[in-house]
Amino acid sequence: MRVAFVGKGGAGKSSIAGTFARLLARRGEQVLAIDTDPMPGLAFALGIDHSDSGIPDAALEEQVVDERKTYRLRPGLTAEEAVQRYSAVGPDGVRFLQLGKARGVRGENARSHQAFQHVVKGIPDAGWSIVGDLPGGTRQPFFGWGNFARTLVVVVERTPASLLSGRRLARLAGTGNISRVLAVANKTTGRHDADLVEERTGLPVIGAVPFDPSVSDGDRVGEALLDHDSNAPAVTAVDDLVSRLLQEEEHA
Amino acid sequence: MKVAVVGKGGSGKTTTSAVLARTFARTGMKTLALDCDTNPNLGLSLGFGEEATEALIGVREAVDAGEEEHAGSVAELIDRFGVDGPDGVRLAVVSAIENPEPGCPCCGISPERLLAQMEDVEGVVVADFEAGIGTIMRMGDEPLDVVVIVAEPTAKSLEVARRSADLVNQHQLGRVLVAANRLRDDDDLARVRAALPGLEVVAIPDEPAIALAERQGDAPLDSAPDAAGVRAMVALSERVMAPASPGG
């Protein structure tokens, strides 16, 4: 499975993506979770220490193509080996890589962006699932950071701002390798919320995650939702989402 | 004066920006609100309504699609792609939405460059930045006057706030003011202070009226002007204009 979660900031992308990755791993999938946001949202949601878990400069080699400096993985280092070696291993065996890390200086991000592209391109389909968390705006998805994904899940809550963002992100269908764009209604308080998301974004709603105080309580103490309350209603809803997407993959 | 509002997505940046901008305008200052977010929703929080907010984005998209002339200067951009709204705040959407090609001043995939080009600002500019630290990371050394960091008392939000404050101080971008948002109790305030030692903090209580306004797409200043959370944001505007009082 290759899925990326997007949505307006605060809509719950990272919490859902992190919980999703762990629940997918519990079903026996080898999962690589990737965060392209320079901020550690996904690491928190996975229950992983957010210290460095990126591809180090030493794993890269500079090359000049058409007079432009570019970077590729060091010869002899495959994408899979890079993942095995440099990712952090978190609860439930999820492997975690943070890419596009903030280095403080303009331009420096080219290196980590290219490392990222090489890794996600080189990871074999067989045996690996990739779950990604893209930053809030539409900048990254439209700039190719979401190219690893075949399924894009837009996380939407029922505020006008989030619904508007969802509608804009729906236009990502057909870019990169994305073959379908789906929506998840988050923080719902009734069936009507999911209907509203479907109606306003024009996207098929594949799941609804209920409003659940466990999520914000966990956030406050810095614990992953699954570690804070594994029986929370939101966990059950994300587990349903895992089932739905797995079923759809089988039919596809 | 240039004021930037930054923070984690969903921490309340846009709501804070809107209350600040309208409060400045009410004191008679010429106020320009810049929506620098690639998900531009500042119009909703300012009280422009959904239709006008989408119309502004529509103009930007028309430029991207080549159906509308590009603006040749920053002044022209604000003139042509902005509208006046409640309390006389002028709002301009300056983030390009889909067009990834950098080009002229109006194709601002780079709001940070645009802000740098605005010299001799008359009155106040309130810039609602994109979620996260991307924009301040790219700011280089173009000074702002005040950077308002909106932080919730959650681990994730405080981590974004901490890194933002580090970058602002490292590049001497401006004075940092922390808006500690959605505080439920003293423990929450203590969490913020502990994570951001030495920074000037303004406390904003958790406010159901603001959450309700967000759900309805209203400006909190219109729907709940007397709610404690809204009053705290109004008080924040006074602190932005007041001289620094470190550790306060």
Image (cartoon, rainbow, N blue to C red):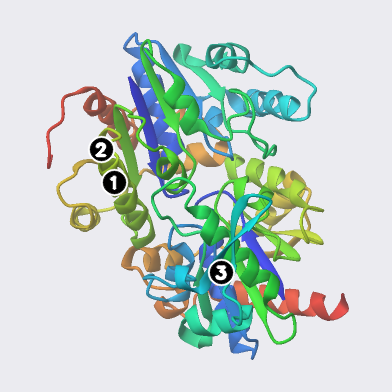
Q: Are marks 1 and 3 in contact (CB under 8 Å)?
A: no
- Asked if B25 appears above or below A21 in the picture, the reply is above
Q: Position of residue B4 (x, y in %)?
A: 38, 32
Amino acid beneath label 1: Ala
| Residue for point 30% across, 40% down | B171
Question: Which chain is mark 3 on?
Answer: A
Q: Are the residues flagged by discs 3 and 2 from a single subunit?
A: no
| Residue for point 51% across, 39% down | B214
Q: Residues within 10 Å of mark 3 (few under 14, many from 20)?
A: many
| Residue for point 74% across, 74% down | A245
Instruction: Give the secondary structure at mark 1.
Output: helix
Q: Position of residue A208 (x, y in %)?
A: 65, 64
Instruction: Give the secondary structure at mark 3.
Output: strand
Is B43 positioned to the left or the right of A173 in the image?
A: left
Q: Residues within 10 Å of mark 1 (few under 14, many from 20)?
A: many
Q: Are marks 1 and 2 in contact (CB under 8 Å)?
A: yes
Residue highlighted by disc 2: B176
Amino acid beneath label 2: Val
Residue highlighted by disc 3: A34
Is A79 positioned to the left or the right of B227 in the image?
A: right
Is A190 positioned to the left or the right of B234 in the image?
A: right
